[in-house]
Amino acid sequence: MDQIFGNLQLLFEFPAVNLEIIIQGAMIGAIFVLVAYGLALVWGVMNVKNLAQGALVIAGGYVSWWLAQRGMPVLVGIPVAAIVLALIGGACSGTPIDKFCRRHWRVAIVFAVAMTVVMFAGLYTTAPGSAWAAYEGVGRTFGTIGGIGLFGILVACGGLYGLVISRVIERDLFTSLLATFGIGIMFEQLMNLMFGSDTQSLRLDYDSFSFFGGIVNVPVAKLLAVIMAAALAIAVIIFMKRSRMGQAIRATAQDARAARVLGIDTERVYAFTFSLNAALCGAAGALVVLVWEIMPFYGIPYSVRAFVIVTAAGLGNLPGVIAAGIGIGVMEQYGGHIFGIGYQQAIAVLLLLLVLLIRLAQQRRNRQVLQ
Amino acid sequence: MSEHIIQVSDVSKSYGGVVANKDISLSVRKGGITGLIGPNGSGKTTLFNSIVGYHPIDDGSIKFEDKEISRLPVPEIARLGLLRTFQQTRIFSAMNCVENMLISLPHRKMTIMQMLAQNSKADHDRAAQLLDFVGLYEKRLLRSGSLSFGQQKLLEFAMALMNEPTVLLLDEPTAGINPTLINGLIDRLKRANSEFGITLFIIEHNMRVIMNMADTIYCLAHGEMLASGAPEDVQNDQRVIDAYLGAH
Amino acid sequence: MTGTGNKIVSYITLALFIILAPLLFPDYRTSLAALWLLIIVALTWDMTGGQMGYNSLGNIFFYGTGMYVAAVVGISLAYDVADYTNAAGGGIYKFTDAQYFTGMLVGSLAAGLFCAVSALILGWLLFGLRGPYFAIGTLGVAIAAGELVSNWDWVGGGQGIALPVYPYDLDQGKLFFYYLFAGLGVAVFAFCAWLYNTRFGAAINAIRDDEEKAEAMGIHTLRYKLIAWSMAAFFVGVAGAFSAFQLIHFEPLETAYQTINLGIFMVVCVLLGGKGTLWGPVIGAIMFHVFKEVTWTYFLGWQWVALGALIVVTVVYFQDGLMGWLKTRRPEWFGIRVEQKAAIAEAAE
């Protein structure tokens, strides 16, 4: 208790601390906005509540980190992560490759099983105490080939969208929630197996701007990340407003049946929306790895925050998402400062509950329920 | 006061810029059959929904047995004994007819201990009797979702009777029902009114039907009250004829 | 007549098997107790999820809260809780047999009641949320509770609590906990079998099928939802209390409020077996337990990937579960009639 009062007092004695907290919170919020906007898209357009959102972010982070480990310039990671995640999300869905795989689905399954076997056989040699330890080098190669082959066939069959999401869109909403939860678990565990459970980060060795005698610090790396997030958001806004696909997405969001009647291929719109969301998450992850750290199980907080933001802001309301994202970032920083860093996760979740209850009270006044 | 069980005074409701109801006042006489007619889009269903609590009203007051209900949510209004059926019927389609009937027991009159008991023989008998009343006894063990639309409407009516309401609001009871069955339905509605003592408030499109049943009729057009009174008066009212046959 | 006779015989056989199983397979006592825990949480999840259509992802909250309440009450009967948790363990503080067993009994009852009451309060706040919002809201409650408890030093913070060990022989202890869980499981099953045949059971089914219609029929929807959830919470709380004493040591995030382990397992069990049926959760729990034991033994390291895949495959391709699949294949086994002829013939008799 005393500690909490002490922390509060600090805020009043040194107003600059407030500024520091707000700036930090806004910077964190800027990255949440990307993830939340992706969620708002898939939620609004295809009514899928994606609990795997955080796992996609972390996956994007690992793509960027993996490239940097192999000597790529750090910033290259951002577009590459976006592209890889778009592929995972379902960028191939509906293309000739996907159609070919679907027509010859038996071949695709046999290929996938064969690749799985090759991968596991290869990995087996690297297990500690394996009888085949002498062939570890060959095993590694086999493991890599199998893994890439499996990844390739899954992507070619439509990725997450084609394999899972497309089958849960029309079903009741709990289905999509649980299916994406399962996807999230799989992703986390695969990343854990591939990269280990240590925290990883990429540090950009730029300076910080300092004000007020060091109370307010603005690291250039974070500033860069915010600028890139903003640029990305603007690009998406322009895309949604100007391009044909953007218009088709907005039309589908309003009324999928009417859009279908008017000749819009809603399947393609859905696939595109989901892979766009995955790409946004991937890019956000690549930014996260620059300014904080990632590990396989750090995804859930991003999912939770994305839900808070979207629930608070509503669907298809980008200015609202931006405001809510930054607001949540700031509130979390304040909460963390006042109650201690251990409560940060709890605060994010409690904010979600708070937002839900406020929305509920609003609806009750209209004699309605929240659904 | 007590003669009128529902009293609607100066109720207005608009959706965005569209005015659906404007200063509507009407009252439903206890024990009678009151009709509400009007062309498509005249605001009949909006008024119904305002009464049973599906949305807030902008202005005015709605009283049921002299109690203000315009701010209560749906289940509380239903528990006062004010029940409605839906234009698009709503039944529990995964259950059979008897189960549907048994769910419709008047829960508002039950205590928790009664809830935690099984349905009694008397409940089953009453369900069978009411299913017989609407002519669905033969189909009682069928999954209700497999019934035809007209039969589902009859089932919904029987469910409403099972609930022993004080007032029953019916939203177009004859819509979608085979014309040859309509006379039977009119007869049953009248009997429900006279035998079970249920006050009826009916939205109806079919002029012949409502003129046959109601003792008082209100006519809405463009969200406003156009005419009211005994069936013959309303039927002969030039404004009503214009509203039905006019260009709108 | 023979139908009831057969039923009685099969129930007696089942009861004998339940009683004899741990004696016949002594190596699997702990695993069988874990299976009973799964059956309990699956059955209670189905009370709201399958029968009432409210898919909670936060029932694990009651499991964890049950653990903590039982432990705190059990300890407080003998010692000061703050001192006990400060010393971080049961090694220093000795419990007599009487203290141990009264602690367990009183603690379990307190856990059940506390959870039932907290379900009433949480439900009052959350039952306005429908569908996915309810799932997210309850998940939020469970996560938040875990985080808050792990910051609460009085109950041991992130370290958790270490309870005293079973006072007699360890093998006997395993048997003891097996029978505790089995007894609770049978009680929950019998309770559900009775509940679903009452008017209350029909009313919560009505809420699942069309809540708006149920409201319009004047059913006390909120009251029934609260009662159903708090009944479920009571049993989960007691199960949590038993687990606390069985596991001896538990901590908040991985054991008590294990959102992504048991919290999601119970849902998967129910989906595997079939939502909204009496036997579905039981069968699903057995199927899931076997799957889990096999993957944990033979695919160590990949077990979680396999589990995620199981969730996805179940949800996407097999959502009605085993019982649901049978229901569409063999509706007559469940007394459902769709054909007109059968019903008319019946009526003519």
Image: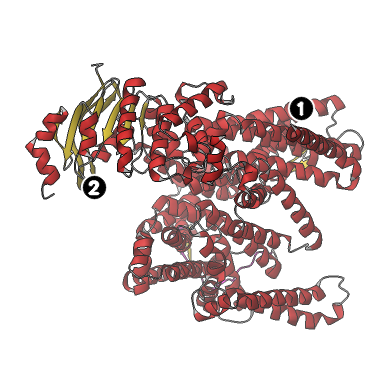
On the image, the x and y values in percent for residue B121 come to: 56, 23
Q: Is residue C60 rendered to the left or right of residue B235?
A: right
Does dot 1 land on a helix, a strand or a loop?
A: helix
Q: Are marks 2 and 1 on the same chain?
A: no
The part of the image, by quadrant, that contains residue B47 is top left
Label 2 chain ID: B
On the image, the x and y values in percent for residue B166 come to: 35, 23
A60 drawn magenta: no
On the image, the x and y values in percent for residue C89 come to: 79, 39
Of B211 and A220, nearer the camera is: B211
Q: Which residue is mark 1?
A: C105
Which residue appears at 61% of the width and 82% of the height? A71
Q: Which residues are magenta?
A: A198-213
Q: Is residue A282 depicted above or below B7 in this figure?
A: below
Does dot 2 land on a helix, a strand or a loop?
A: loop
Q: Which residue is mark 2?
A: B16
- Mark yes or no: residue A238 visible: yes
Q: Is residue A335 depicted above or below C239 in this figure?
A: below
Q: How is the image coloured?
A: secondary structure
- Mark yes or no: residue A220 visible: no
Which residue appears at 49% of the width and 78% of the height? A95
On the image, the x and y values in percent for residue B233 come to: 11, 30
Q: Amino acid at mark 2?
A: Gly
Of A77 and A216, nearer the camera is: A77
Label 1 chain ID: C
- Mark 2 neighbour density, 10 Å: few (under 14) some (14–19) many (20 or more): few
